[in-house]
Amino acid sequence: MDTQPDRQEFYSRIAGAGLAPLWEVMKNLITKEPKSAAVPYIWRYETVRPFVLEAGGIITAKEAERRVLILENPGLPGQSRITNTLYAGLQLILPGEVAPAHRHSQSALRFVVEGSGAYTAVDGEKTVMRPGDFVITPSWTWHDHGNESAEPMVWLDGLDIPIVGFLDASFAEGHSDDMQMLSRPAGDSHARFGEGLLPVGFERRSPASPVFNYPYERTRAALETLRRTQEWDPCNGLHMRYVNPLDGGWAMPTIGTSIQLLPKGFSTAPYRATDGTVFCCTEGRGKTHVFGPGGKLETLEWGPRDIFVVPSWNWRRHEASEDAVLFAFSDRPVQEKLGLWREARGNA
Ligand code: GTQ
């Protein structure tokens, strides 16, 4: 007996009452394992750089408010996201420009890709940025960017826009001035929070790290010292995360950031985790083998300034043909707080 017509008729009647049958959708709602619509993808800097610079002739930073080309995952077209939960973009600031001060619920990170000497001001303090610097803009802090150097500056933006959108918790406002007033000298936060010291009696007001620039120079020096111990993780090489000195947690509450050194010739064991991850290469060259749509094995070949994404639960393996350094970010802190984060390791 064909029950379909009866069922369809039932479904249309209950739809009018705001009801729907779970059994028709359950397998897609509660999957046996993560099934991300995002796909692995690489943005080679030599391919995207001309477009980023071309945008500089199309609109000013002031008119655009933020002149950014979004790195949109091809599996999520039109959704302004690089993974299901995170947004990424390449922001250009030309010499003499200012991206006017604003604030929003979304937290942002900057990872400098090209140029040196432009600044970001966050909550009354300026920080000058150099390639490989990791800078954070915590939720609801005023921030403006400017470039007083003679070169264009490009950085990778990472924001939790899809997460905040999912929670319907977005607020934003523009400042009355393009540039906020500065209340502390450059380096103040670093001296106060980034030197193994904390002001006695300091009262925490934000879940984000009070250190807002993690300069590449120090990060790179740490990796260089640590490589001598050769305690490599088989899946991730020498892998360090950026830390909030107040509690030892991630530097940002919604985005986890890390840096890893893969020495020349290092080939990692297969790895997957539930946090879809965005990588940006700062030095060296290598390949990442990853299973793409339909289980097809793909190879992403990367070098300096290239950005690539590995979605949730996709197996991947890195191979470094030169000493390579990868910066990475993902939603891991959110998943950890919710007790959802998982990883799996394969054999080398
Ligand atoms: O620099 O404040 O890529 O507000 C997207 C939204 C950068 C920023 C983005 C933003 C910013």
Image (tube, grey):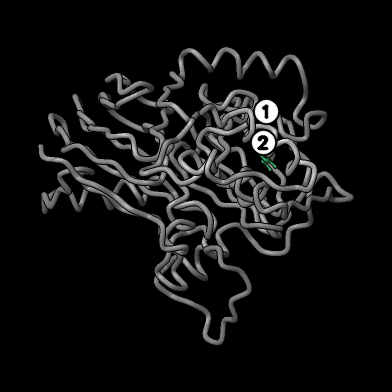
**x and y percentages locating residue 74 in the rendered image:** 52, 21
Number of marks drawn: 2
Which structural element holds mark 1?
loop
- Three-letter amino acid code at the position of disc 1: Pro
Residue in view at x 61 percent, y 69 percent? 206
Question: Which residue is most to the bottom?
Answer: 201
In the rendered image of this protein, does residue 179 appear above or below residue 76?
Answer: below
Looking at the image, which residue sits at the far right?
A: 176
Residue drawn at x 48%, y 12% is 47
Mark 2 touches mark 1? (CB < 8 Å): yes
Note whether residue 153 is visible.
no
Badge 1 density bin: few <14, some 14–19, many ≥20, Cα 10 Å = some
Name the residue beneath numbered marker 1. 95
Q: Nearer the viewer, residue 51 or 228?
A: 51
Q: Secondary structure at mark 2?
A: loop
Q: Earlier in the sequence, mark 2 or mark 1?
A: 1
To which quarter of the image does residue 234 belong?
A: top left
